[in-house]
Amino acid sequence: MLRLSKLTDYAVVVLVRLDGCGGVVTSPSLALDTGIPEPTVAKVLKALAAAELVVSQRGARGGYRLAMPLERIAVAAVISAVDGPISLTACVDGAVGGCEAQGKCAIRGRWDPVNEAIRAALTRITLADMRPPASSDSFSIDHQPSRSVASFAAE
């Protein structure tokens, strides 16, 4: 089963919430708004700042803000920022040393096209596509995407 990590899911929630705030927001405020524990929000924000998806502002009026509009942030970029490169198996994209059967594997390299198709689909989906409907006031972790991911895979 393919499944995103909780941290990646939380990162999407935090980024979409930051967009709704329209300015600099503190980690405790984001935690309160989203229902995600503050230490987890802080951890997610640190990874997102390292990937330059958010900008950290220090000082009395410090906090975090988006580094770019949601329309320019691909879901693939969030996954990579939090979990590292997108790869289905240890040997995708020519990685070495991640598989015990590497020397005798008959399908080595055959996962690359599948991995690339998934990566391409996740690159086409932006966080703007993940915004809740305008009538929704809720930004809890029990969110639903506004557009089916399957619709992007079909494109």
Image: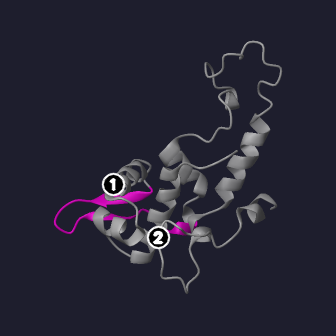
Q: Amino acid at mark 1?
A: Ala
Q: Quadrant of residue 14?
A: bottom left
Q: Amino acid at mark 2?
A: Ser
Q: Nearer the viewer, residue 124 or 145?
A: 145
In the rendered structure, the answer to whether residue 51 lies left or right of residue 28 reads right
User: Which residue, given by chain and number where applicable, does mark 1 sit on?
Assistant: 42
Quadrant of the drawing holding the N terminus: top right
Calculate the distance from the C-alpha at mark 1 to the C-alpha at mark 2.
17 Å
Q: Is residue 104 visible in this depiction of the protein?
A: yes
In the rendered structure, the answer to whether residue 145 lies left or right of residue 25 reads right
Quadrant of the drawing holding the C terminus: bottom right
Residue 35, how many percent across, how many down? 40, 66
User: Which residue, given by chain and number where applicable, does mark 2 sit on?
Assistant: 140
For the magenta stretch, what is the residue range? 53-71
Q: Nearer the viewer, residue 152 or 27?
A: 27
Seen in the picture, residue 134 relative to 119 is either above or below; the reply is below
Seen in the picture, residue 16 relative to 87 is either above or below; the reply is below
